[in-house]
Image (tube, rainbow, N blue to C red):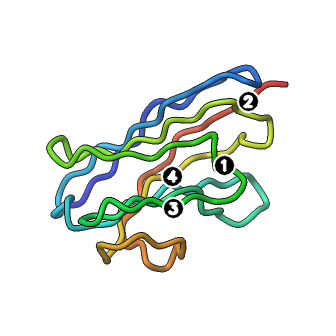
Amino acid sequence: QVLLLESGGGIVQAGGSLRLACAASGFVFRRSAMGWFRQVPGKEREFVSSAGGMDGNTVYANSVKERFTISRDNNRNTVYLEMKNLKPEDTAVYYCAASSNSWTTIDSRDYMFWGRGTQVTVAS
């Protein structure tokens, strides 16, 4: 059974930092690209970042470049999202996802497994 469990969300002041983690199990983690998406009520789920399974490549949404960093520990089957200089518009539920491909992808349709999400709230 595939399981993706996010943690690390919370409430932070604008300019602050948070580190999200996603612990994965039930599939070959190192072969799967992992992604982070976010969603606010009434809006579509938005791509944030992706890390390739084998090539080490990463990709970011323009809105988070220079502020967010994705990393993965293939020994711990965990992917992280380090978020710095947070802004109120970063407020959302953040979801971890596992792709059916090993290369980075920004398309949510390429992700076959999803976590339940963790709330990030940035106060102004």
**Amino acid at the residue labelled 3:** Val
Query: Which image quarter is the N terminus in?
Result: bottom left
Instruction: Give SS at disc 1.
Output: loop
Q: Residue furthest right?
A: 124
Foreground: 20 or 66? 66
> Which tag is nearer the camera, tag 3 or tag 4?
3
Residue wearing tag 3? 59
Residue wearing tag 2? 122
CA distance for labels 1 and 3: 10 Å
* Mark 3 crowd level (few <14, some 14–19, many ≥20, 10 Å Cα): some
CA distance for labels 3 and 4: 16 Å
Say which residue appears at 60% left-offset and 63% top-offset: 47
CA distance for labels 4 and 2: 16 Å
> In the rendered picture of this protein, how many numbered marks are placed on residues?
4
Residue wearing tag 4? 95
**Amino acid at the residue labelled 2:** Val
Vertical side of 77 occupied by 112: above or below:
below
Pointers 3 and 4 in contact (C-beta within 8 Å): no
Sequence order check, earlier mark of 4 and 2: 4
Foreground: 70 or 3? 70
When asked about the image quadrant of residue 98, the answer is bottom left
List x then y, in percent, for residue 90: 72, 42
Determine whether, in the image, residue 111 is placed left or right of residue 63.
left
